[in-house]
Image (cartoon, helix red, strand yellow):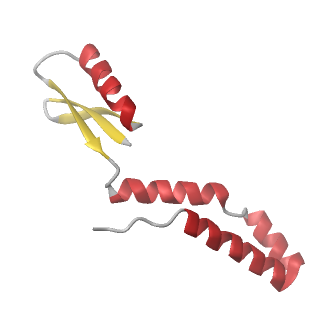
Amino acid sequence: MKKVILKQNGIEIGSAIVEDEKSQEMADIYADNYKGEEYSIEVIDLSQDYDFLLAECIKNRMSEYPSPEDFMNAFFDGGDLAVQELQSKRLLIKSKYPKPVKE
């Protein structure tokens, strides 16, 4: 993923996060629409950005985690085995989407 940033006089006024192959296209769109010396375009590779990677990890995990309702049903109605099954599911999801390592 890449972040394409539009700056005016050095201040960020717009940005877009896009797939790698779309970054040049987005930069070209900004360049076509914002001409002049006061505008600049910067492209940042997010593949090593810890905060971005962590946010993606959390978003992916949350989309697959059991719902609060699933937990309540397992805890109050399913007994220990149902809670253990939910915990196993959570651990599988955590291994599928590991947290990034800060360098």
Image coordinates for residue 73, horizontal then vertical, percent? 84, 71
Image coordinates for residue 49, horizontal then vertical, percent? 32, 55
Q: Quadrant of the N terminus?
A: top left
Q: Please state if 62 lies on the left or on the right of 89 as rendered.
A: left
Residue at screen point 77% across, 76% down:
85
Q: Please state if 77 lies on the left or on the right of 59 as rendered.
A: right
In the rendered image, the residue lying farthest to the bottom is 80
- Front residue of 12/29: it is 29
- Front residue of 76/49: it is 49
Q: Quadrant of residue 62?
A: bottom right
Q: Name above or below for residue 40 compared with residue 36.
A: below
In the rendered image, the residue lying farthest to the front is 21
Residue at screen point 63% across, 73% down:
91
Residue at screen point 87% across, 77% down:
78
Count numbered badges in the picture: 0
Q: Name above or below for residue 77 compared with residue 39.
A: below
Residue at screen point 34% across, 23% down:
25
Q: Please state if 79 lies on the left or on the right of 7 as rendered.
A: right
Q: Please state if 71 lies on the left or on the right of 96 as rendered.
A: right
Q: Quadrant of residue 34?
A: top left
- Front residue of 22/86: it is 22
Image coordinates for residue 72, horizontal then vertical, percent? 79, 71
In the rendered image, the residue lying farthest to the right is 77
In the rendered image, the residue lying farthest to the left is 37
Image coordinates for residue 43, horizontal then vertical, percent? 25, 37
Q: Name above or below for residue 23 compared with residue 34.
A: below
Q: Quadrant of the C terminus?
A: bottom left
